Amino acid sequence: MNSTTSSSPTPSGGRDATGERRDWFRFDRADQWGLALLLALGVAVGVVAWLLAPIIGWAQGDPLAVPFFSEVEVPGLAAAGIGHSEADYSLLLSDPSTGQRMADLVPGVVYLLLVSAVAWLLLRVMLTIGRGEPFDPANVRRLRVLALVLMAGWTVAYFVEATCTFAILADVDLESAGVEGGPRAALTLPVVPFVTGLITAMVAEAFKAGTRLQDDVDGLV
């Protein structure tokens, strides 16, 4: 007597367990969890770098590193008749006051709030895309807020950081160290976040157009 055995087809060639062809560009639940974990990791790194590390250094009595910008003397270059530019370096304050420690923490708190806001807005946008609703009107608002955070928020954070740096150095006797003209800082505006914010604002307008088109299509059905 002949016997036959049947076996279920094994998914292959980019197909899932049901035999359907897998859409590699679909933002499914696994991708949502992966993005959420990645964004959470970014916020966690910010907490460690901007909050925990300074606080632990404060508790251990470590010197306070303050960015500084001034002229420096390099005897070897001077002896060879070679000039050089001013330099960016860190001053290490061995006995900073409580006020200086607190001022050092403020920029980190501001940057952490910005990173948390960016992570939250990105996650909310991607979750609606995962539900198949990329042109949800709420996404236009979220992208606009994201653009504002990147452009205005990072610029404000930069000036907060510069202000705190000058406040810390105001209590340092720089003249006794031969530094004239008071504290100075190199001007490095946050160009990358600003440009990224502009691109995000343009994407928001594209989503707005998509939302209007989606409304028109729904009205025809």
Image (tube, rainbow, N blue to C red):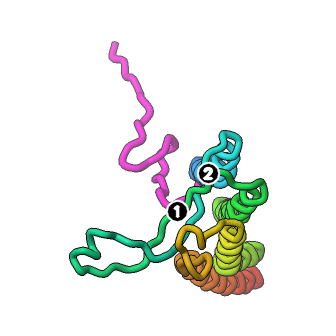
Q: Secondary structure at mark 2?
A: loop
Q: Does residue 100 sit above or below 7 in this rendering?
A: below
Q: Quadrant of residue 205?
A: bottom right
Q: Residue furthest front?
A: 176
Magenta region, mostly helix, strand or loop?
Answer: loop
Image quadrant occupied by the N terminus = top left
The residue mark sitting in front, 2 or 1, is 2
Mark identifier at residue 173: none
* Position in image of residue 161 (x %, y %): 67, 70
Q: Does residue 25 sit above or below 187 in this rendering?
A: above
Residue lying at 48% horizontally and 45% vertically, measured from the top left: 16
Give the extent of the magenta segment: 1-29
Q: Quadrant of residue 111?
A: bottom right
Return the residue at label 1.
90
Q: Secondary structure at mark 1?
A: strand
* Position in image of residue 19 (x %, y %): 47, 45
Q: How many tags in the picture?
A: 2
Q: Quadrant of residue 158?
A: bottom right
Q: Does residue 94 sit above or below 211 in this rendering?
A: above
In screen coordinates, is 99 left or right of 74?
right
Residue lying at 66% horizontally and 39% vertically, measured from the top left: 60
* Position in image of residue 84 (x %, y %): 34, 79
Three-letter residue code for mark 2: Ser
Residue lying at 53% horizontally and 72% vertically, measured from the top left: 178
In screen coordinates, is 21 left or right of 149?
left
Q: Nearer the viewer, residue 104 or 200?
A: 104
Q: How far apart are the alpha carbons under marks 2 and 1?
A: 12 Å
Can residue 32 be seen? no
Q: Is residue 133 magenta?
A: no
Return the residue at label 2.
94
Residue lying at 69% horizontally and 80% vertically, measured from the top left: 152
